[in-house]
Image: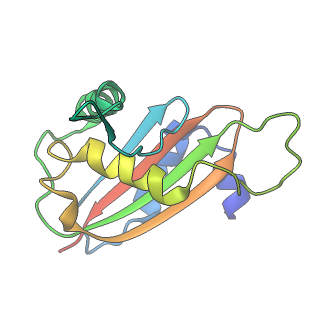
Protein backbone atom coordinates (compact mmCIF):
# COMPACT_ATOMS: atom_id res chain seq x y z
CA UNK A 1 0.00 0.00 0.00
CA UNK A 2 1.50 3.36 -1.02
CA UNK A 3 1.69 6.50 1.12
CA UNK A 4 -1.25 8.33 -0.50
CA UNK A 5 -3.65 5.45 0.06
CA UNK A 6 -2.55 5.09 3.70
CA UNK A 7 -3.18 8.81 4.32
CA UNK A 8 -6.74 8.46 2.98
CA UNK A 9 -7.58 5.85 5.63
CA UNK A 10 -9.38 6.93 8.79
CA UNK A 11 -7.10 7.70 11.76
CA UNK A 12 -8.24 4.57 13.62
CA UNK A 13 -7.45 2.33 10.63
CA UNK A 14 -4.05 3.99 10.29
CA UNK A 15 -3.29 3.14 13.91
CA UNK A 16 -4.45 -0.43 13.33
CA UNK A 17 -1.92 -0.65 10.50
CA UNK A 18 0.82 0.44 12.90
CA UNK A 19 1.76 -3.15 13.72
CA UNK A 20 2.91 -3.59 10.09
CA UNK A 21 5.40 -0.71 10.37
CA UNK A 22 6.86 -1.34 13.82
CA UNK A 23 10.07 -3.37 13.79
CA UNK A 24 9.78 -6.79 15.45
CA UNK A 25 12.68 -6.04 17.82
CA UNK A 26 11.03 -2.91 19.28
CA UNK A 27 9.81 -3.27 22.87
CA UNK A 28 6.60 -1.28 22.91
CA UNK A 29 4.71 1.24 20.83
CA UNK A 30 1.85 3.67 21.14
CA UNK A 31 -0.43 5.43 18.68
CA UNK A 32 -2.13 8.69 19.62
CA UNK A 33 -4.57 10.88 17.71
CA UNK A 34 -5.17 14.43 18.89
CA UNK A 35 -8.21 15.89 17.14
CA UNK A 36 -8.26 19.58 16.19
CA UNK A 37 -5.89 22.07 14.65
CA UNK A 38 -2.22 21.27 15.37
CA UNK A 39 -0.71 23.77 17.80
CA UNK A 40 2.83 25.19 17.44
CA UNK A 41 5.06 25.96 20.42
CA UNK A 42 5.02 29.69 21.22
CA UNK A 43 7.72 31.71 22.88
CA UNK A 44 7.30 32.73 26.53
CA UNK A 45 5.94 36.26 27.03
CA UNK A 46 7.64 38.93 29.12
CA UNK A 47 6.20 42.12 30.57
CA UNK A 48 5.98 44.15 33.79
CA UNK A 49 8.94 42.24 35.21
CA UNK A 50 7.16 38.87 34.77
CA UNK A 51 7.31 35.91 32.44
CA UNK A 52 4.26 33.80 31.57
CA UNK A 53 3.24 30.90 29.37
CA UNK A 54 0.22 31.66 27.16
CA UNK A 55 -0.09 28.01 26.14
CA UNK A 56 -0.46 26.43 29.57
CA UNK A 57 -4.14 25.52 29.02
CA UNK A 58 -3.55 24.21 25.47
CA UNK A 59 -0.64 22.04 26.67
CA UNK A 60 -2.80 20.69 29.52
CA UNK A 61 -5.56 19.81 27.00
CA UNK A 62 -3.06 17.92 24.82
CA UNK A 63 -1.58 16.21 27.89
CA UNK A 64 -5.04 15.12 29.02
CA UNK A 65 -5.69 13.54 25.59
CA UNK A 66 -2.35 11.71 25.81
CA UNK A 67 -3.22 10.50 29.31
CA UNK A 68 -6.63 9.29 28.16
CA UNK A 69 -5.21 7.39 25.14
CA UNK A 70 -2.02 6.01 26.72
CA UNK A 71 -2.41 2.26 27.24
CA UNK A 72 -0.68 0.82 29.22
CA UNK A 73 -0.37 3.66 31.70
CA UNK A 74 3.34 2.90 32.25
CA UNK A 75 5.71 5.50 30.81
CA UNK A 76 8.25 4.57 28.16
CA UNK A 77 11.69 4.52 29.79
CA UNK A 78 14.03 3.57 26.93
CA UNK A 79 15.17 5.34 23.77
CA UNK A 80 12.28 6.42 21.55
CA UNK A 81 11.57 6.77 17.86
CA UNK A 82 8.67 9.12 17.08
CA UNK A 83 6.70 9.70 13.91
CA UNK A 84 4.32 12.67 13.84
CA UNK A 85 1.90 13.66 11.08
CA UNK A 86 0.21 17.05 11.33
CA UNK A 87 -2.97 17.36 9.28
CA UNK A 88 -3.85 20.99 8.53
CA UNK A 89 -6.94 22.58 7.01
CA UNK A 90 -6.48 23.90 3.51
CA UNK A 91 -8.03 27.30 2.83
CA UNK A 92 -9.88 27.75 -0.43
CA UNK A 93 -7.52 30.56 -1.41
CA UNK A 94 -4.47 28.34 -0.91
CA UNK A 95 -3.39 26.65 -4.15
CA UNK A 96 -0.21 25.06 -2.74
CA UNK A 97 0.11 21.28 -2.82
CA UNK A 98 2.51 21.15 0.15
CA UNK A 99 2.04 22.92 3.48
CA UNK A 100 4.93 25.39 3.26
CA UNK A 101 3.32 28.16 5.30
CA UNK A 102 3.22 28.77 9.04
CA UNK A 103 3.26 27.15 11.52
CA UNK A 104 6.83 25.85 11.36
CA UNK A 105 7.28 22.11 11.60
CA UNK A 106 9.88 22.44 14.37
CA UNK A 107 7.48 24.44 16.58
CA UNK A 108 4.70 21.88 16.03
CA UNK A 109 7.06 19.06 17.05
CA UNK A 110 8.22 20.88 20.19
CA UNK A 111 4.64 21.42 21.40
CA UNK A 112 3.89 17.68 21.05
CA UNK A 113 7.15 16.73 22.80
CA UNK A 114 6.45 19.04 25.74
CA UNK A 115 2.82 17.92 26.05
CA UNK A 116 3.80 14.24 26.25
CA UNK A 117 6.55 14.87 28.84
CA UNK A 118 5.83 13.04 32.09
CA UNK A 119 2.86 11.14 30.61
CA UNK A 120 4.07 9.09 27.64
CA UNK A 121 7.77 9.22 28.55
CA UNK A 122 9.86 10.55 31.42
CA UNK A 123 11.60 13.27 29.42
CA UNK A 124 11.92 14.29 25.78
CA UNK A 125 15.68 13.65 25.99
CA UNK A 126 14.76 9.97 25.42
CA UNK A 127 13.81 10.75 21.81
CA UNK A 128 16.62 9.67 19.52
CA UNK A 129 14.80 9.80 16.17
CA UNK A 130 11.93 11.94 14.85
CA UNK A 131 10.06 11.82 11.56
CA UNK A 132 7.49 14.56 10.99
CA UNK A 133 5.25 15.70 8.13
CA UNK A 134 2.72 18.48 7.52
CA UNK A 135 -0.16 17.53 5.23
CA UNK A 136 -3.51 18.95 4.18
CA UNK A 137 -6.73 17.18 5.18
CA UNK A 138 -10.40 18.02 5.78
CA UNK A 139 -10.10 16.91 9.43
CA UNK A 140 -7.29 18.75 11.22
CA UNK A 141 -5.51 16.52 13.72
CA UNK A 142 -2.14 15.28 14.94
CA UNK A 143 -1.20 11.60 14.72
CA UNK A 144 1.73 10.40 16.81
CA UNK A 145 3.40 7.00 16.71
CA UNK A 146 5.93 6.30 19.44
CA UNK A 147 8.16 3.25 19.34
CA UNK A 148 10.38 2.26 22.27
CA UNK A 149 13.64 0.78 21.04
CA UNK A 150 15.51 -1.99 22.85
Is 88 displayed left or right of 123 in the figure?
right
Q: Which residue is drawn at 31% across and 72% down?
A: 24
Give the quarter of the image for residue 119. Answer: top left
Q: Residue at x 54, y 42 (%)?
A: 13
Give the quarter of the image for residue 8. Answer: top right
Q: Where is residue 83 in the image (x, y as percent from the top left)?
A: 43, 60
Q: Between residue 63 and residue 7, name the one nearer to us.
A: 63
Seen in the picture, residue 9 relative to 18 is either above or below; the reply is above
Q: Where is residue 18 in the image (x, y as percent from the top left)?
A: 44, 55
The N terminus: image quadrant: bottom right
Seen in the picture, residue 107 relative to 93 is either above or below; the reply is below
Residue 28 seen by the camera: yes
Q: Position of residue 14 (x, y in %)?
A: 53, 47
Q: Where is residue 82 in the image (x, y as percent from the top left)?
A: 37, 62
Q: How many marks?
A: 0
Q: Which residue is drawn at 82% across and 55% down?
A: 97
Q: Between residue 9 and residue 96, name the one nearer to us.
A: 96
Q: Which residue is drawn at 69% across and 52% down?
A: 101
Residue 27 seen by the camera: no
Give the quarter of the image for residue 150. Answer: bottom left
Is 37 displayed left or right of 18 in the figure?
right
Q: Between residue 38 and residue 102, name the one nearer to us.
A: 102
Seen in the picture, residue 29 relative to 119 is either above or below; the reply is below
Is 139 displayed left or right of 129 in the figure?
right
User: How was the colour assigned to the protein in this rendering?
Assistant: rainbow
Amino acid sequence: MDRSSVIKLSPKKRCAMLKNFVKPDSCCYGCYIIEGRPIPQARPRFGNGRCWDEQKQQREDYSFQFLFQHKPAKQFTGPLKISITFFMNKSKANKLEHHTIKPDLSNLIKFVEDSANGIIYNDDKQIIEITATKLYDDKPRTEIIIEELP
